[in-house]
Amino acid sequence: MMQQRAQVYEMKRPAHEAKIRLKNVRKVFKLEEKEIEVLSPINFEIRRGEFLCVVGPSGCGKTTLLRILAGLEEESSGDIEFVREATQPGKKERRINSMVFQEHGVFPWMTVRDNVAFGLKAQGMGRKERYEIADEYIEKVGLKAFKNAYPHQLSGGMKQRASIARAFANDPEILLMDEPFAALDEQTKIILQAELLRIWEETHKTVVYVTHSIDEAIVLADRVMIMTTRPGNIKEVIDVNEVFSRPRNVDNVKSSAGYGEMFGRIWSCLRDEVMAHQREVEEGK
Amino acid sequence: MSSTTKTSKNMFCMTSDNFEKMLSVMSPVVLLAIWEAAALFGWLDVRFFPSPTAIFAGLWNMLISGELWEHVSISIVRIIVGFIAGAIPGIIIGLAMGMSSKMRAIIQPLVHATFPIPKVAILPLLILIFGMGEMSKYAIIALSVVYMALINAYEGVRDIPPIYMDVGDNFGANRKMMFWDVALPGAMPAIMAGLKLGMGVALLVIVAAEFVGAKSGIGYLIWNSWQIFEVEKMYVGLMVTAILGFATAALFNYMERVLIPWRKGPSRRPARSKKNAKA
């Protein structure tokens, strides 16, 4: 019995199996004849089931990278390979990814329930079935009492809970998150980070999480990818899991001795890039 | 700031909400009273400007005889049929223009070219095409409404924040869902604004159209009464038009609350009056 369970866990999280392979992914924006390189060729493997945080100076293309992964923008050159999960016999193919957007991502004209069920509706699921699944995830994010409320009746934190429920309800293979908690106050942020970890640990989906907060990256990530200033590339990848193992407790991580050291390590990598970005801004580049 | 909020308590010691409501009721009443007095004291020529009481008496007589309802009902039917015939295609085409650049390329020049033509100016043409019957009235109303619905629906879609389109894309919504679940509700506030404008224009146009191209309706009542010098009846016609305008505005405000439940609605008041209401 015990052995069987361990095996399932192994199947869920084998060490270092690739989920997304980025090969020479490059992105160029054209602005009045001028070409601006946003991402210089990136080569990277995002592991299956890992929580990857991407940090970098503003304008470094981290959101662009995420939007490319989400299929909302196309890479200018290079190749992205998704390693798909085997489809269960008799079941529909799962969505490859779902995105949790920045603060205004929930539809103001839909109730929480319809927002959460949106992806399922897009997959062609009937009303009764999709509401059942939506309700389950609404309960998971603690919005049960608000399932018939409209977003304007919710606080910023509650809206992001709905947004997270919508992405998880869709049951994608990969979750993409674009600074979902950036607009929230510190207290709400800490609580939502803990809840996100709790829900994520139930499923261990592959997560790519863009943030500008080093603190958030340490608390959430298995690995932190630090990006250079524009054109964005990988400066360094730091393994947080070596220091803070799973399952992780947000409060313990923040108050632990290793936290400050980890913060310093990431910041020392990031500082030069942020300074370089500052100089660019000052020179009006 | 604090000193102004303290002194803003009004002389009736009411909450500012009720005070404002009372002002809204009082202003027309006071105006009517001045008018009545002016007629009474001979400051106005009552042959052209009969007193409000005389007009109300005329209104009463026309109500009793059923004459008024005959004219009003036929105008209302024209407005409703024409409005629906204009609004629905207007909304659909406008949304399609907002969602598809091809549709935009096809329709936009036509709209820009034909919108500025005064709709009343093509009434002769419409009568030529549809005859003197009801069809020509429906057509001119529909034509007046279609632009308001179309332009506002189009702008409404264009103003939807791109993030909602991204959400739709990322979650794999098909065209049908993009239309019904994203574009239509997202543009709904603008569409309602367009429909309100359209209804205003419909009232203007129906009265003008009935002046010349009809033997019934409110416009006919006004024009005919003027020609046979039954001035009171003309004023009754004007008054009924005003009441219709007021009633449709109220109806549309109600529809807006039902159709756009996600709007903050009545609670979205200026901060200042809220403070007073608590005091």
Image (cartoon, helix red, strand yellow):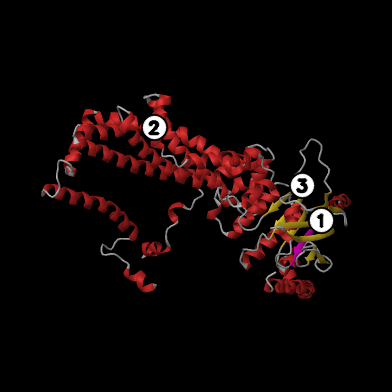
Kindly tell me whether residue B115 is visible in this rendering. Answer: yes
Residue labelled with disc 1: A25
What is the tally of numbered marks visible in this picture? 3
Q: Which of B42 and A25 is in front in this view?
A: B42
Cα distance between the residues tagged 3 and 2: 58 Å
Residue labelled with disc 2: B123
Q: Which chain carries label 3?
A: A
Queried whether the magenta region covers residue B146, the answer comes back as: no
The amino acid marked with disc number 3 is Ile
The amino acid marked with disc number 1 is Val
First in sequence: mark 3 or mark 1?
1
Residue lying at 75% horizontally and 45% vertically, measured from the top left = A95
Q: Does residue A9 appear left or right of residue B231 in this picture?
A: right
Please give the label number shown on residue B102.
none
Q: What span is colored magenta in the figure?
A: A49-56
Q: Does residue A261 appear left or right of residue B149 in this picture?
A: right
Q: Mark 1 lies on which chain?
A: A
Q: In which quarter of the image is the C terminus of chain A?
A: bottom right
Q: Position of residue A70 (x, y in %)?
A: 73, 51
Queried whether the magenta region covers residue A55, the answer comes back as: yes
What secondary structure is the stretch in magenta mostly built from? Answer: strand
Residue lying at 77% horizontally and 53% vertically, measured from the top left = A75
**For the residues bearing labels 3 and 2, Cβ distance under 8 angstroms:** no
Q: Which chain carries label 2?
A: B
Q: Dot 3, how many residues are within 10 Å of its Cα: few (below 14), some (14-19), or many (20+)?
A: some
Kindly tell me whether residue B186 is visible in this rendering. Answer: no
Secondary structure, mark 3, is loop
Cα distance between the residues tagged 3 and 1: 19 Å
Residue lying at 37% horizontally and 41% vertically, measured from the top left = B248
Residue labelled with disc 3: A96
Cα distance between the residues tagged 1 and 2: 62 Å
